[in-house]
Amino acid sequence: MSRGRGRGGRGGGNIATTLTTQGSQPQPQARVYAITKEQAPTAPEVITGSFSICGSSAHVLIDPGSTCSFISHDFASRVHASIESLGHDLCVSMPAGGVMLVNTVVRSCPVVVEGVTLYADLVVINLREFDILGMDWLSCNHALVGCQTKEVTVEVNGEMKTVVVGETKIIPNCLISAVTAFNLIKKGCEAYLASVHDVAKISPGVSDVSVVREFPNVFPEELPGLPPH
């Protein structure tokens, strides 16, 4: 388990963020871990779940490695959230390269989980996969994150309560991806190529034998075997 102390985001890969203000040097980079919906259920570092943000259902990534919490611009517009200026620019290095400059936030956005209402300041960003709750949200709510059990426990009225049970995905141990197989072969692992053929015997029909098919009224529809050559 890890205890939260920061904010979160939305997307696919590791995202670095740098805070800049006019006339000042950039602050040290912080990390935001972003991931796709397909990868999230099996990723040990994060937890995914669906609950209410700003009064509307959202697919959320809870990431202890994030320093900021993010909400997508599309989602914020859809729920008519009140968007304010951050008062400074936040430089976000995207996983695919390039930098995104963000400077707006939805403050004190209600996050309802298992009937418990918590609040988060969500930086607005143009990413598609998730709304991400990060270390700032976890810290404010004295959260404990169980990455192995996919659970998040927060303090409610002086008591600890489990409010998020993340989505998990069971992958059979006997299956590996093609990329994993390729890497294992490169390391010297022994591999075998198997070819599967259907060996079910099919009785020949009249139309399958030359000469015979010219006299369909003489021979039965199914032949016991082919004539000798």
Image (tube, rainbow, N blue to C red):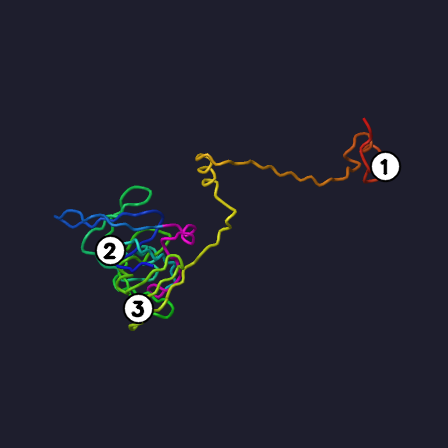
Which one is nearer the viewer's eye here, 132 or 87? 132
Identify the residue at image location x=29%, y=72%: 158
**Kind of residue at disc 3:** Glu
Residue 109, x across and y down, in percent: 29, 64
Q: Residues within 10 Å of mark 2 (few under 14, many from 20)?
A: some
Question: Which label sits on residue 104?
Answer: 2
Q: Residues within 10 Å of mark 3 (few under 14, many from 20)?
A: some
Which one is nearer the viewer's eye here, 104 or 181? 181
Q: Residues within 10 Å of mark 1 (few under 14, many from 20)?
A: few
Q: CA distance from mark 1 to mark 3?
A: 85 Å
**Kind of residue at disc 1:** Phe
Q: Which quadrant of the figure contains the C terminus?
A: top right
Q: Which residue is mark 3?
A: 155
Q: Which of pointers 2 and 3 lies earlier in the amino acid sequence?
A: 2
Residue 188, x across and y down, in percent: 46, 34
Question: Which label sits on residue 9?
Answer: none
Residue 123, x across and y down, in percent: 27, 56
Q: Which of pointers 1 and 3 lies earlier in the amino acid sequence?
A: 3
Question: Which label sits on residue 219?
Answer: 1
